[in-house]
Image (tube, rainbow, N blue to C red):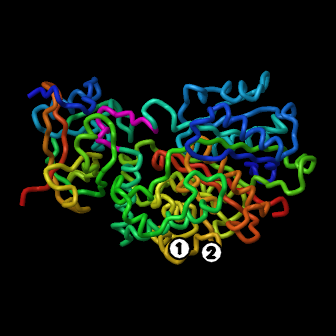
Amino acid sequence: MAETTYKKPVPRIDEETRGYWEACRRHELVLQRCGKCRTLRYYPRAVCPECLSDEVRWERMRGRGTVYTFTVTYQNQAPGFRDELPYVLAYVTLDEGPQMLTNVVGCKPDEVEIGMPVEVTFEDVSDEIAIPRFKPVAS
Amino acid sequence: MNSIRDKVAVIGVGCTKFGDLYDSTYEDQVCDAAFQAYADAKIDPSEIDAAYIGTYLPHSQGGKAGISLADPLRMYDRPVTRVENFCATGTDAFRNACLAIASGQHDIVLVVGSEKLKDRPGRGIPRIGHQILAKGNTAPGLFALAANRYMHEYGVGRSTLAKVAVKNHWNGARNKLSHLRMEVTEEQVLNAPMIAWPFGLFDCCPTTDGGAAAIVCRADIAKRFRDDYALVKGAALAVATGRPYFDPTFDYVGFRSTQAAAKKAYEQAGIQASDVDLAEVHDCFTWTEITNIEDLGFAEKGQGWKMVEEGRTRVDGDMPINPSGGLKSFGHPIGASGVRMIYECVQQLRGNCGERQVKDPEIALAHNVGGPGAVSCVVVLGRQDS
């Protein structure tokens, strides 16, 4: 499971993000819903950006969405990313509404299209961390 | 609220050669630009009351605080402030200098932008990863996400983007100070190596070293220095979220910080977008120039690309954009870029630009946007008789 060859930055868990990463480790995508104004938000934060309440509930997402926009990156010399060129950076709109900056994997970069349905997939990069990305919905 | 309009004059400007300046230091650039501006204004440095230095990314040779200007220029015992505001650093430094004059605190203020992006460890701009958000997002990649969505919504192809590069390189090839001083063809742009779809190499501005300077003073004393000074008509800054991809209202086809800054600057100037005779806009990527045209109000949203296709943004068009060559060809030393735009606007208003001179301009605009979309600054300048 723990891959010592993973060269990209490995996220550190903190109190704001613990629930998110613990769910990712179980290969579940969860977002925070404000306990007061009910706004669903991404990324995980201690305080609601709409009403400033710190009442937080974690809510499991269906893990499906569509590509709002994307780019195929051909140049990035940062460790780890360099080895995966070209890769897809995308902005995915979840069925539940929030949008995530993410990667589309599991297909050739030139197969990605705006509006394409995608579903979450997890890459296990350490004992604690699995990174959510998206892949085309199997037809 | 009082407008800043006509309270501040630009009496001197200077600009270094832009490029890979491995043979000059950060401080050399500050001195080169500042002394050009002193000579242009025919001013003795002892008359400067205060200074602002714009640098985005401090270099081992300087850029972090007021001393970055005070030491090379020996400008001691006076207020010197470093300004940093992403890619709007240069125009925001200029804006702060204007506010210092308009407040009545100072009579004459120096603005310098200087940036060394080339000879530093890990050349270029380092990407600092966010714990959750870092997905391999590069600067071209973040703008490319917006460009791709725009092209999808409005049915625009890469050949339209390429025309921005062709036009700006044509202008820059005629500018002795520009970094990439050559013309390119649409075919060359389209066939260049891909950086981040839809941007190829020639859709991207270079990373550049350079410096630029401007001297501003109370408008009522400007005549002491020169007759053909420029007047500051408006100078506005707007900040939006630093993570526009998580702003639910952000549709990725334009930048609200530019829209807000432009609206404010036009209000201050008492003008409309259609009164602007030329604009130096933030073309960090070819698509960015197209959205800027719209966000600044020169075209409706989704229509700006047609102005490019119709050649209206060329020097001889009815809305000349980036007659200097823009970031695309002139180069983009981040903190210097905005001040360099002021330099170009002033030279255009004076009629000094030769083959790329816009015909008889009265109102010129300088615009930076950074983030992408997080921060934007718009400066409107007018001829002394405007």
Q: Toward the viewer: A11 or A84?
A: A84
Residue type, label 2 = Gly
Q: Is residue B200 left or right of residue B73?
A: left
Quadrant position of residue A6? top left
**Chain for numbered disc 1:** B
Q: Quadrant of the C terminus of chain B?
A: bottom right
- The magenta span reads B124-137
Q: Toward the viewer: A69 or B2?
A: A69
Q: Is residue B74 left or right of residue A86?
A: right
At 63% across and 43% down in the image, what residue appears?
B92
Q: Is residue B102 visible?
A: no
Residue beneath disc 2: B317
Residue type, label 1 = Met
Residue B302: x and y in percent read 45, 69
Residue B117: x and y in percent read 52, 38
Residue A93 painted magenta: no
Q: Secondary structure at mark 1?
A: helix
Q: Mark number for residue B307?
A: 1
At 58% across and 74% down in the image, what residue appears?
B312
Q: Are marks 2 and 1 on the same chain?
A: yes
Asked if residue B257 is positioned above or below residue B38 in the image, the reply reads: below
Mark pair 2, 1: CA separation:
9 Å
Residue B301: x and y in percent read 48, 67
Asked if residue A94 is positioned above or below residue B107 in the image, the reply reads: below
